[in-house]
Image (spheres, rainbow, N blue to C red):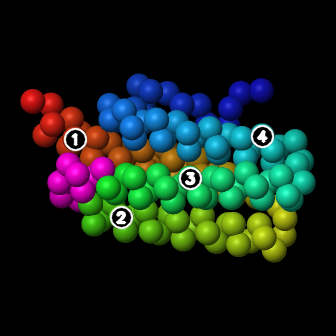
Amino acid sequence: MSNFFEWDNSKFGLNVQEMDAEHRKLVGLMNTLHVLHEKGAGAAELGKALGEFVNYTVKHFSDEEAFMAKINYPELRVHAGVHKSLLARVTEYATEFKKTGKLTDAFFMFLKTWLKAHICGVDMKYGQHANHTHAA
């Protein structure tokens, strides 16, 4: 069985080592969550994995924003706003899970779309900024 989300460094790598490592970990946590969902794991096991994913997402967004501040990324405020809305959506799904004990296919499609679009879109911009301004 292949992973729900295959990491491809040529597509998703930002050439920013610490952020690429965090993105790979985020993808790994998402894949673990998807495997548990697919095999029909119980609510306790799913809840634990979902909690790890949500907690790591919060940590990653915080780390990413700190990194952008460090490199004086001009779009930091906009990017932080995107993080805030993504986290609100993830929290909505987590709240729904607490009520039902189930994760939906819509949740996983949201995650996959979010990760691809976010990394390939707004994250690539700060990666280019970091590599351009700090390549000297």
| CA gap, disc 4 and disc 2 | 30 Å
Dot placed on the residue nearer the N-terminal end, 2 or 3:
3
Residue 115 at x, y percent in the picture: 51, 47
**Residue ID for mark 1:** 130
Q: Residue furthest left?
A: 136
Q: Quadrant of residue 12?
A: top left
Please name the residue shown 34% across and 57% down the image. 65
Identity of the amino acid at label 3?
Tyr
Identity of the amino acid at label 1?
Ala
| CA gap, disc 3 and disc 1 | 23 Å
SS at mark 1?
A: helix
Q: Is residue 80 above or below residue 68?
A: below
SS at mark 2?
A: helix
**Residue ID for mark 3:** 56
Q: Quadrant of residue 81?
A: bottom left
Q: Quadrant of the C terminus?
A: top left
Q: State the extent of the magenta-drawn residues as a range.
A: 67-75
Q: Quadrant of the N terminus?
A: top right
Dot placed on the residue nearer the N-terminal end, 2 or 1:
2
Dot placed on the residue nearer the N-terminal end, 1 or 4:
4
Residue 109 at x, y percent in the picture: 64, 51
Dot placed on the residue nearer the N-terminal end, 4 or 2:
4
Residue 122 in view (yes/no): no
**Residue ID for mark 2:** 80
Q: Quadrant of residue 44?
A: bottom right
Residue 82 at x, y percent in the picture: 40, 64
Disc on res. 35: 4
Identity of the amino acid at label 2?
Ala
Q: Depth check: give the residue in front, 115 or 59.
A: 59
| CA gap, disc 2 and disc 1 | 17 Å
The residue mark sitting in front, 2 or 3, is: 3
